[in-house]
Amino acid sequence: MKLLNLNETLAFMKYRKITSILSIILIVASIISLSTNKLNFGLDFTGGTLLEVGFSQPADLNDVRASLEQGGYPDAVVQLFGSPEDVLIRLGQRDNVKAEMLGNEILGLLQAGNEQSVEMRRIEFVGANVGDELTEQGGLAMLTALICILVYVAFRFEWRFALGSVTALAHDVILTLGLFSVLGLEFDLTVLAAILAVIGYSLNDTIVVSDRIRENFRKIRSGEAEEIINISLTQTLSRTMITSLTTFLVLLALFFKGGALIHGFATALLFGIVVGTYSSIYVASTVALALGISKEDLIPEVIEVEGADQEEIRM
């Protein structure tokens, strides 16, 4: 591929000090919010009650939510389960409430003013211990992913790129968690899955940029590290924007039409793609440049083999 002329290159690194200050401010604000407001953990983490009810006709989820909210259950998560007649209701943990009493109360709320018959199919409890275990395993999953990424990029490219990539991923995760903390959005296993997906998406973008930077360090004989990084970012910009835009449009459809069940999932991915694209351009490259990445670090060493210049011995 033909390299861009330096005059055609966008000066991304010119603004690295401003973007670094912005990132630090956002990270600090996110950490403060996570320390004070914490996360609004969903039923998967806090424990609670799961009820399955059956309707004689297709259920209207909006009517079910309205009935439960009027009856004192505004935190109820309602979704279809297998068929339009089967509804799954998830409630937060309630102390000193027996299963039979809770089931009868929910059943009475759904039957009030409803012409069709409603029956209770099952009631299950998710204990707090299970919630704590899920919280711990979710945190360990993200930590393991970051460590594996650090090792992979260090072997694949160079340790400065590895630290830049992990810094960018940590930046994306902290800001996404901070968004959910500030807005008080429910954090459940679907959101955790979205954050892990953001890690993969951001890593892929960062790897593409790092690969182009390494390639240009080897091809371009003159120029400072900042200039070469700017050339590499400019060359990958169109690919990054097209990928991000197409993914963003799909997630917008999920956000507006996907329903309440995956609203948090779509929110996390929408925000994660924005900060992931930003971090792959500014955070990862800025960290590598600040650590002193240079041409000598990326050009493979030439190993002289003794006798290489001699004629091959014929058998």
Image (spheres, helix red, strand yellow):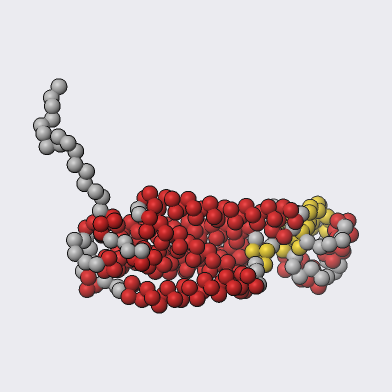
Name the image quarter holding residue 42. Answer: bottom right
The residue closer to the viewer here, 221 or 116, is 221
Q: Judge from the rendering whether residue 139 lies leftward or rightward of residue 121; answer left or right.
A: left
Question: Residue at image x 36%, y 63%?
Answer: 291
The answer to whether residue 115 is visible is no
Q: Position of residue 165 (x, y in %)?
A: 42, 60
Question: Residue at image x 75%, y 56%?
Answer: 128
Q: Exactly how many numbered labels are in the figure?
A: 0
Name the image quarter holding residue 107. Answer: bottom right
The C terminus: image quadrant = top left
The N terminus: image quadrant = bottom left
Question: Residue at image x 71%, y 56%?
Answer: 131
Name the image quarter holding residue 76. Answer: bottom right
Residue 308 sits above or below residue 121 on the image = above
Residue 38 sits above or below residue 198 on the image = below
Q: Judge from the rendering whether residue 17 lies leftward or rightward of residue 47; answer left or right.
A: left
- Residue sitting farthest toward the top: 315
The residue closer to the viewer here, 46 or 109, is 46
Q: Judge from the rendering whether residue 279 lies leftward or rightward of residue 68; answer left or right.
A: left
Question: Residue at image x 43%, y 50%?
Answer: 151
Residue 113 sits above or below residue 204 on the image = below
Q: Position of residue 78 (x, y in %)?
A: 72, 62
Q: Position of residue 249 (x, y in %)?
A: 48, 67
Q: Position of residue 196 (x, y in %)?
A: 54, 57
Q: Judge from the rendering whether residue 63 lies leftward or rightward of residue 216; answer left or right.
A: right
- Residue sitting farthest toward the left: 311
The answer to whether residue 114 is visible is yes
